[in-house]
Amino acid sequence: MKREKGCNGSASVGSVEPPSTLEKHLYLRVFRDASLVFILPDEVFPRDLEEAEVIVSGLVEVLSELTQAGARILLLVQVPERYGSHLREIMGQSMAAMRTRFLPVTGWQSLLMNHCRASDAVLVGLCSDATEEAFHSRLVEYAGVLGFSRMIVLNALGRIQRQDGKPISFVLADGIRKLLIDLPEMPEETLRTLSLVESLLQQGVESVSLCRIRDLPQELFTYQGHGTFFSRRHQCDLRRLVWRDYPQAVSIIGQGEREGFLLPRSEHDLAPILAEGYGAFVSGSVMAGVCGLLTSPYLDENLGEIVSLYTVTRFKGEGVGRRMIQGLKQEAARQELNGLFACTTHERVVAFFQREGFRIVSHDRIPQAKWTHYDEARKRSVVGLVWSINA
């Protein structure tokens, strides 16, 4: 497996674009009132204390944005023996502007009661475990007893990569074993970290992100991510968009428009799509894709049009699009529609719909209301597809 370097002063594999202001704003809204648990093992800390200050300052910058958005943070830190008391001093100086409490961890009870009593935005649990095995055992125990939901495990090597160097962005809990088989040359430290992640998910943690400290802004605040996201849930839940979902749905659709997969739409045209829109969610709250089901323009034919179907970058190829189609078929049956149709200019999208049981039809088999005020030049390149509920 190919390593990503750059955490402990080694060479970087290239620059990573920072998250856009809009993406960051939307994700910070998602993290509002959330409780996030960050894991800092010994391996993320360099030998040199001055380098440690740089690493901690990068982490603190992200934590500051999260706490300003209303998130509460728990840091569980495996304090390196070589640092002695210096790590607390370094972190204390960097985190002085935040409401932070440092706590030598002796058991989960002290964490629980300090979390309940304190108004601090950040609780730092300093763990004196001398070995990685002991630290991991502590984490698994605490996750099971305290009911952690979202955890971010920081490491030195970054996200998991395939043997060809392509990053693995999303893994379901039952896919970890397959990773171990598919990537036999995985470094020992990564094998141990994957074992930890698997144990955390088995204890009920909804999701775990694995990344380097330097990649946290991209992992937490962008659609693409820059780590590996592990989810306990085996399915992607589809539900109607509601008020709080609309800003993020608009942003995701906009991403699809910029990439050329979705037809750019005016606000006037986008509003009904959102009002009749659906979101695909993993781990309960992470929006992985959006789609619209328009029915009001096609009452005469009793059909629904699938529009603005788009999957967030990191979840592409993971069955999210298929789950949305399955959900829309179920919704069509619930509404007693005759069927569904979709229009696209992309061959890959045509193939996707065909795999889901849609068949290509001529334009005159598409409701005529679809073509009202439609651009004639674009229409000539559009492929229409129909799925009949009784087929």
Image (cartoon, rainbow, N blue to C red):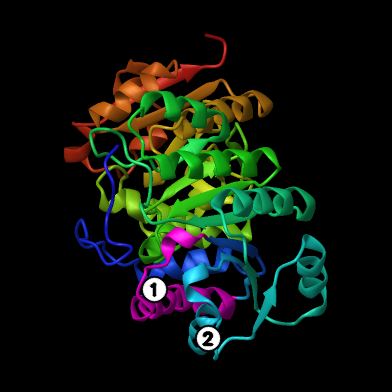
Q: Is residue 344 left or right of residue 68?
A: left
Residue 387: give its label.
none
Please provide the residue range marked out in magenta.
41-69
* Disc nearest the viewer among 2 and 1: 2
In the rendered structure, does residue 55 fall within the stretch colored magenta? yes
Q: Is residue 309 visible?
A: no
Disc 1 marks which amino acid?
Ile
Q: Which residue is mark 2?
A: 89
| Quarter holding residue 232 | top right
| Quarter holding residue 309 | top left
Residue 115 x %, y %: 76, 72
| Most common SS among magenta residues | helix
Residue 36 x %, y %: 61, 63
Check the image and report above or below for 145 versus 310: below
Residue 72 x %, y %: 65, 72
Q: Residue at x 35, y 81 (%)?
A: 50
In the rendered structure, does residue 80 fall within the stretch colored magenta? no
Q: Residue at x 50, y 82 (%)?
A: 86
Neighbourhood count class around disc 2 (C-alpha, 10 Å): few under 14, some 14–19, many 20 upward: few
Q: Image quadrant for the N terminus?
A: top left
Q: Nearer the viewer, residue 318 or 276?
A: 318
Distance from the alpha carbon under mark 2 to that under mark 1:
14 Å
Which comes sooner in the sequence, label 2 or label 1?
1
Q: Is residue 357 visible?
A: yes
Check the image and report above or below for 100 versus 371: below
Neighbourhood count class around disc 1 (C-alpha, 10 Å): few under 14, some 14–19, many 20 upward: some
Q: Which secondary structure lies at badge 1?
A: helix
Q: Which residue is mark 1?
A: 55
| Quarter holding residue 360 | top left
